[in-house]
Image (cartoon, rainbow, N blue to C red):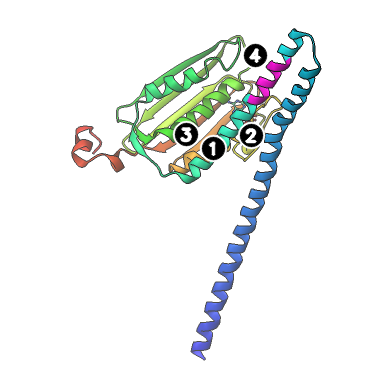
Amino acid sequence: VVELDKQIEMQNRSSECLELQNTELQKVNKELDQFVYSISHDLRAPLTSVMGLVELSKLEKDPEQVKHYHEMMERSLTKLDIFIKDILNFSRNARLDIEAAAIDLSELLTDVFSQHEYAHSGQLIEKTVDLELPFPVYSDKRRLKVILNNLISNSIKYSDPAKGMSYIHLSAKSTDQDILFKITDNGIGIDESRVVRIFDMFYRATEFSKGSGLGLYIVKETIETLGGSISVESTLNKGTTFYFTIPNLASTVMSSEELLEAKLV
Ligand code: ADP
């Protein structure tokens, strides 16, 4: 009887386990479905508009108008390119191992800011960087760049033209354990009821968004892959602040002598 009881218990446990796996699979399946749907929609939208513009250009005789169509094509193709880059970053984050190395944060930030120099035509945005790095910064450079790129590009994209002077303030601080970042802008801000969803896949919180809605999802996934966390504070029409922390991976890379030398122990 005892044997039988044991067997029944084991069977119950394995069927519970199966049920759990089944629910997990259903969730993954649903996410995949949504992913494929949104991707094909977002890939097709700019493609269809380029195809339409090609047809219009073929019929057009006025060179000025043709030039205008070309500019519109360029905009659609840039959008497509950004979207494909987002998808690549997303899959790289899921696939690649973490590569910890020493990072010159000041150089990395100059690099990221310079990529966005011409992103916002016309409007001047004041950018300030405040670094407090008593401990050397060790992390996965490629991933950190993806995170900073997305957050900074959002602060530029969602800057508020109604404000006289737009700004982005970035500060970073290192400890022996973590690297803490804060990025503040005085942009358009996010509606209180929407702010909880901004890290969701494909979520756009404003009609001003021309993006894929993938950026912050990738940011969050990437930070979590590194073992960190992110939070946000935002007020509509005032501005937004993102805080994120990632582990300082110095101790996983440096030898004990190097750690001593860098005053990390
Ligand atoms: P998108 O491709 O739409 O930019 P993201 O995932 O990067 O997608 O961001 C999701 C939404 O969060 C955006 O559509 C935007 O409404 C809002 N958002 C993100 N960053 C900011 C910011 N710095 N200021 C105001 N709104 C922001």
Amino acid bearing label 1: Leu
Region of the chain picked out in magenta, as a range: 69-77
- As helix, strand or loop, the secondary structure at mark 2 comes to loop
Mark 2 or 1: in front is 1
- The residue nearer to you, when weighing 239 against 29, is 29
- The residue nearer to you, when weighing 105 against 189, is 105
| Residue 161, disc | 4
| Residue 245, disc | none
Mark 3 or 1: in front is 1
Q: CA distance from mark 4 to mark 1?
A: 31 Å
Residue assigned mark 1: 88
Residue assigned mark 3: 244
Q: CA distance from mark 4 to mark 3?
A: 27 Å
Residue assigned mark 2: 213
The answer to if 74 sits in the magenta stretch is yes
- Ligand 1 within 8 Å, label 4 CB: no
In this rendering, the answer to whether 263 lies above or below 1 is above
Amino acid bearing label 3: Phe
Residue 153 position within the rendered picture, expressed as x and y whole percent measured from the top left: 55, 24
Q: CA distance from mark 4 to mark 2?
A: 21 Å
Residue at 59% from the left image edge and 29% from the top image edge: 82
- First in sequence: mark 3 or mark 2? 2
Residue 42 position within the rendered picture, expressed as x and y whole percent measured from the top left: 68, 35
- Ligand 1 within 8 Å, label 3 CB: no
- Residue 222 placement, left or right of 234: left
Q: CA distance from mark 3 to mark 2?
A: 19 Å
Mark 3 or 2: in front is 2
| Quadrant holding the C terminus | top left
Question: Do tag 4 and tag 1 residues touch (Cβ < 8 Å)?
Answer: no
